[in-house]
Amino acid sequence: DAAKWALLLRQLGTTSSMEEAVVFAVENPGKADEFVAAAVSWMRVNAGLRMRILMAIDQICARASTAPSAEASGSRPAFVNAVRAYMTLMFKALLLRDGPTQPPADMTVRVRKLLQKWEKRGTFSAAELGDARSLLDAAEGTAPAAAQPTDRGARHEEEAGIRPGSSGGDISARGGRIAGGGGGGGGGGGG
């Protein structure tokens, strides 16, 4: 499952691969923490995929929230809980600077709209989105400093062996292996 998820993240450039990733994640709720941790790691090292991964996460949260099992249980889906747990780390990865420049303005506008959408549809509360908004403000230069992680994602990341600035290779998570960037055969063009 972890290897397939890594492959799907690598191939998020097309609509069909996006749909395949969404369906795969929704059908594997028991792997939600592992999948979100891998997505955060990929965001750190693949600047070109950051927004695509965030859009996939948004679609997975929406689909998981409307799944019959989620509606019947009345509780928050596992994937949404995992995103909440990794919220600060995810937005730190998303807003990483690739040099001395700020993130592109069009990206920060899209991210702000997504945060508003999540709050409006009730995926996350304003309080749960607070750190993400603070990080976005800091990235845009409208806040004095970035927020410190207040969620359990930092603890999960440590337990999973994921370190800031990891270079992509294999990343261990909860005893499994998540195939990282580069190397290996199969699949088209890399990166």
Image: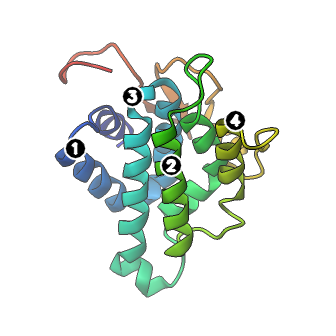
Asked which secondary structure carries label 3, the reply is helix
Q: For marks 1 and 3, give the one nearer the viewer.
A: 3
Residue designated by label 2: 109
Q: Would residue 171 appear left or right of 53 to someone viewing this image?
A: right
Q: CA distance from mark 4 to mark 1?
A: 30 Å
- Point out the tag, 4 or 3, that comes first from the N-terminus: 3
Q: Tell me which amino acid carries mark 3.
A: Gly
Residue shown at 58%/21% (left/top)?
A: 166
Query: In the picture, residue 159 is in which quadrant?
Result: top right
Image quadrant of residue 164? top right
Of the two numbered discs 4 and 3 in the rendering, the one whose residue sits closer to the viewer: 3
Secondary structure type for disc 2: helix
**Closer to the N terminus: mark 4 or mark 2?**
2
Q: Are marks 4 and 2 in contact (CB under 8 Å)?
A: no
Please report contact status of discs 2 and 1: CB closer than 8 Å, yes or no.
Answer: no
Q: Amino acid at mark 2?
A: Val
